[in-house]
Structure formats: C-alpha cells, structure tokens
Image: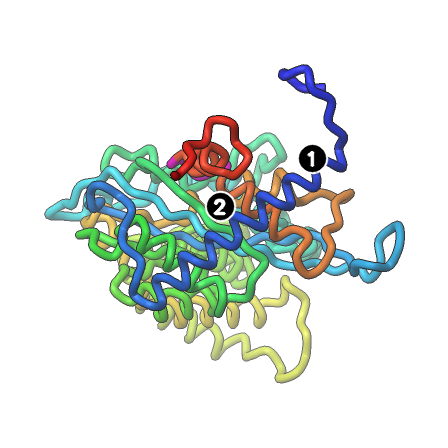
Amino acid sequence: MGLTGLSISPRHVQQLTAEVGADLARQRDAQALQRRRRQLQPRVDQTPAAVVVEIDGGRLRTRAPGEGRGVHQAENKEDKIACLATLQSAAHGHDPQPQPPASFLQPRRVQRLVQQMAGQAGEPSRDGPAAAGQPAPRGSGAGVEPPSGRDIEDEPWAPKRRMRTCVASMAESRSFGPIVAGEAQARDFYAADRRAFVADGLAYNWSIQEGYFPDFEPIVDLLHVLCYLYKAAYGLGADEASRWSLYESWLRRCWQGRVAEVIAELTGHQHQVGRPPPGEELPASDVRRVVAEGLSYLSSNAARMDYPRYRRLGLPTTSSLVESLVGDVNGRVKSKQKYWNRPSGAEVILQVRAAYLSEDGRLHRYFAQRPGNHYRRRVA
C-alpha cells in the first residue's frame, strides 16, 4: 500500500523495475550507437566550460540463473560506473596550493585511509601496514577520520561540482567505453575548454581514456598514489620516524610534480632489497613486493601525475566524485544477502539507479514520456 492507496505486490514492482531498466538500457545503447555513427547531437543549451569524466568500479555478488531456489555458482562480478560532471572552477597563473593539505600529513589519518582503501580493494586487513607485529602510528584508532578527496575539494581554488550524470553497467570495458562516450557527447563535453579524465591506475580505465577521451587531460587519482607511497615507505623504514619521513618526502614531491625523483629513489631501494622472485606470490607486507608495486604504479602513471599543472587549470586531482557515486550505487545493489542473476540480473537495476542519481531530471522525464502515463502528450 503506497501513498496512492493502491495495493501492489513486490513481484509486480520487480517486474516493472525490470521493464524500466531494460528500456533505459536500450536508450543508453542507442545513444552510444548514434555517437559511433556520428549522428548524436549535444542535448544541452550551452557548452560547459570545464568538465570531468571519472571512472571507477565496485563488486557485487551474482549467481547462476535457472538453478532453482537459493544461490548456485556464486561469483563476484564488477560493475563499472562513470561520473560525468560539469565544474565550477577557474584557471590560475600559478600553482594555487604548492603544499599538500594538512590531513595528508597526519599519521593516524593517513594510516586509516590506507586501511580503508585496502578494504575496498578486497585485501585482507592482516596484511595492512600494521601487520606482522609492526607498530602502528601512535594513537591510531577507528575513531580517526581519514583524509579524502573532500580535503582538496574544500580548498578555495578547488573545482566544485555543478551537475553530474552517471552511467553504470556490468559490461566489459570495450563496451563500457562507447557508453560513456555517448553520454559525454550528449552533454557536449568534447567541446568544453577544459576537460579532465580521472581514474585510478587500472589499465582498462586508460584504454577507455585513450580510445574515447584522448583530448581530455589524463589524471591518476592522487589518493591511490598516496597509498602506494605509504606502503613502500612503511616497508622500507626501520622505525616509525624513518617510515613517516620517507612517506612525507615522497608525497610532497609527487604533489609538486617531481615524481621522477621518487621513481629514481624507489629504483635505488629496489636494487637494495631485490625484486620479487618470478612466479612467487609474496605476502602483501613483504618489502620486495611493496617497493615493486609502488615503483610499477608510479612508473606506469608518471605522465598522469603533473598535479601542479592540473591545479593551475582548475581540474580535479582525485576521483572522489565517482567514488562517492559508487557508494550510492552499491547501496542498492550490494550486500551479503543480494545475489543477482547472471548475466543481466543487476544490469536493469543499475540503469534505474544511474538515472535516479543523475541530476538532470532524466528519470522524471522518462516516466513523463513513458507509454501508459496518463499525462503523456499524445502525438497525432
């Protein structure tokens, strides 16, 4: 019984939601096809001045369909989510913040961030910085609020989100790229003066950027860089003071665009500790592993770490917009009790959720124009 006084069963709601989600997916795919055929025209009144495309993903539980009641052949599958936002920002003639925020230089908060992001990636907490009997930073505890992209967003110079839309799918990256590009074209992002593409270091993110957003400024998320620096410093330092000294030195240099210096220093440390043995899976706390992983991450993403330049352009340096969006999406599709049928069980829900979380009123317009709406204007 809802606000209308009408009785409707959960199964009926489920059926209607599946129909709506499938319809939204068809519209999304048609938009991507229009763009590929160069037939898609922007659907905005004014070209935005500054824009960002951010991509991230989450994990949800799936099961094999048609196997009767219960969960059969359970698997974790990735959902891909893109946030496309217009920005309110200004370009600067100089670096508006040459030093990192204070929260990035507070041991307890940084440790909490590293633990939090490791948990999001599914890594076991026993292999975190406080593993193997090593001491944690003094006074660390669960009540400490870790730093986040908001710490940068709150700075006066930082770009502010004006309006976002989002797309989400269980599709593979080669199919997800055209979907995101179709949404960007519809919002006239390709004509904006300042354009950014922000993501973590996963290879498929940058395949999408190179294939569909080659003229966007590629920016690797600073918070992921911070975590790799912290883990490497923790593995190399002999005590708490030396570990923190290494981390702080490397963070400042990366913040200031001097990543080549950090790569050179890590290369020297790798020569001292040695490389991971080929084919051997080392514990996450092994110093050879953390140094190799940090060096690999920085070397692969060095061209996307010119943070002083991004700040001068008024562009974001973290993927906090999409990471908060992932949380909003996962609030509907992810829990220990939810298992979605493969391959399309979650896909329709993702479409409804993405439309609901988009700030351009698209879900309201969809229902207003959907056949069967009593207030839909009929075309003669």
> What's the magenta region?
356-360
In the foreground, 14 or 111: 14
Residue 279 higher or lower than 299, as above or below: below
Instruction: Find residue 180 and report its horizontal and vertical position in percent.
Output: 41, 57
Location of mark 1 (residue): 13
The answer to whether residue 243 of the structure is visible from this angle is: no
Please give the residue where the numbered disc 2 appears in the rendered image: 323
- N-terminal-most mark, 2 or 1: 1
- Of all residues, the one furthest to the bottom in this rendering is 278
Provide residue 33's location: percent of width, then percent of height.
41, 64
Identify the amino acid type marked 2: Glu
Single out the residue that lies furthest toward the front: 380
Label 2 – label 1 distance at C-alpha: 29 Å
The vertical placement of 181 against 157, above or below, is below
* Residue at x 65% of width, y 51% of height: 346
Residue at point 24% right, 48% down?
Answer: 311
Q: How crowded is mark 1: few (under 14 residues within 10 Å), some or many (20 or more)?
A: few
Figure quadrant of residue 17 = top right
* Total number of numbered discs in the rendering: 2
Question: Coloring scheme of the render?
Answer: rainbow
Q: Which amino acid does label 1 sit on?
A: Val
For the stretch drawn in magenta, what is the main secondary structure?
A: loop
Residue at 27% from the left image edge and 41% from the top image edge? 87
The answer to whether residue 65 shows anywhere in this view is yes
Q: Which of marks 2 and 1 is in front?
A: 1
**CB of mark 2 within 8 Å of CB of mark 1?**
no
Quick one: SS at disc 1?
helix
Check if residue 274 falls in the magenta segment: no
Image point 73% across, 27% down: which residue?
8
Name the mark on residue 26: none
